[in-house]
Image (cartoon, rainbow, N blue to C red):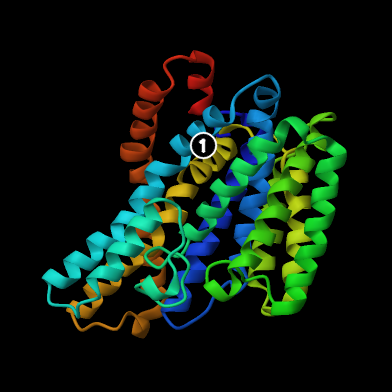
Amino acid sequence: MGKDHAYSALDGLRGIAAISVVIYHYSDNLGWELLPNAYLAVDFFFILSGFVIAHAYEARLQAGQTVPEFMQRRLIRLYPLYWLGTTLPIVVIIAALLLGQPPSEGTRITTSYFLGLLFLPTPPALSVFGSRVFPLNIPAWSLSLEIGVNAIYAFANVHLTTLRLATIVAVSALGLIAIAGFYGTLNLGHSWPTYLGGWVRVFWSFFAGILAFRIFGANRRPTLPSSIAALLAFVMVAAFAWRDDGKAIGLFSALILFPGIVWVGAQVRLNGIAQRLAAWFGAISYALYITHEPIFDALWVLCRLNHWDPRLAFWPNLIGWILIALASAWILDLVYDLPVRAFLTRKLTRRSPELRAAAL
């Protein structure tokens, strides 16, 4: 999506959402919860993913692109950073052990790691961290569901008329309302007691994004001024900052606000500095999302080694650690993710130059 300047505002919004998740997790771990509803960024990511994947692949799938070809390209896009985000916690654990930190159960760490590498959740009895679905790197749960719903979409695409798609979206919306009523929140999917709720979240959001693209694609007019993108970012962050962590804000955001933000954001065309800044935010967003937890764990180990409580200087540490996470994501995108994806694309997609160009 980063190459399509018509959707550059959506790139920027994706980056703002990823930064919001980092603020949410870091501030919570430092004892002062900011942006308490930023877990809803996952719903925004899923809606945006559906929209962008429909933009990039609908025509190809309908023209005969096979499911294995589609999934190969999705894995090339997602797996290098996913592998790194799953492996970095192991590096942190080993480093902590070498530095004299309390040991963890080796067998459970190994099981959690290898299941995680396969996008598979870790059963509680085998998990190194209790009820977490992906214990080594919590955000991995959403990537697992992303791969799952991508595969379902690819298999169903040939038969997925707009009417059938609208039916899936309507039923999923009812399911979302039901699970929000049952749990009292949409903060679902990352733990075993709420794992099935995560699937309902992704079904609604991903297929709503595809439907939004189909409806919007016929009347595409990306001519709104760049100031609209700033307004959309403000509204999204305001929803994340809302102090009521309940079903009302979750349902409003997932069912109404985020689809509307994607719909309007797709009609904003950025230029110049605004476009370049949005492209940068979009480029680092995935690396930031999937690696910020291991980076936080490493920083926390350093604090323990130096007998330093980072909660005693909340704002300097929060700002400093966020800047470290941003810089790390930027570096990883440039020196790791882009070169690895280019290498895998050359090696695995030689038979199809057209699709090779699309994979990047």
For the view shown, which residue lies furthest in the right direction? 163
- What SS does tag 1 mark? helix
- Percent position of residue 204, x then y: 73, 55
Q: How many marks?
A: 1
Above or below, comparing residue 113 to residue 33 in the picture: above
Q: From this viewpoint, is residue 256 visible?
A: no
Left of 127 or right of it: where is 52? Answer: right
- Percent position of residue 211, x then y: 79, 42
Quarter of the view holding residue 313: bottom left
Left of 187 or right of it: where is 131? Answer: left
- Percent position of residue 277, x then y: 53, 41
Label 1 CA crowd tier, 10 Å (few <14, some 14–19, many 20+): some
Above or below, comparing residue 122 to residue 360 in the picture: below
Residue shown at the point (30%, 55%) measured from the top left = 87
Above or below, comparing residue 262 to residue 353 in the picture: below
Q: Which residue is mark 1?
A: 74
Q: From this viewpoint, is residue 303 visible?
A: yes
Residue shown at the point (57%, 48%) measured from the top left = 148
Closer-to-camera residue (293/136)? 136
Q: Amino acid at mark 1?
A: Arg
Closer-to-camera residue (61/23)? 61
Quarter of the view holding residue 344: top left
Residue shown at the point (73%, 30%) measured from the top left = 158
In which quadrant is the N terminus drawn? top right
Residue shown at the point (43%, 65%) measured from the top left = 122
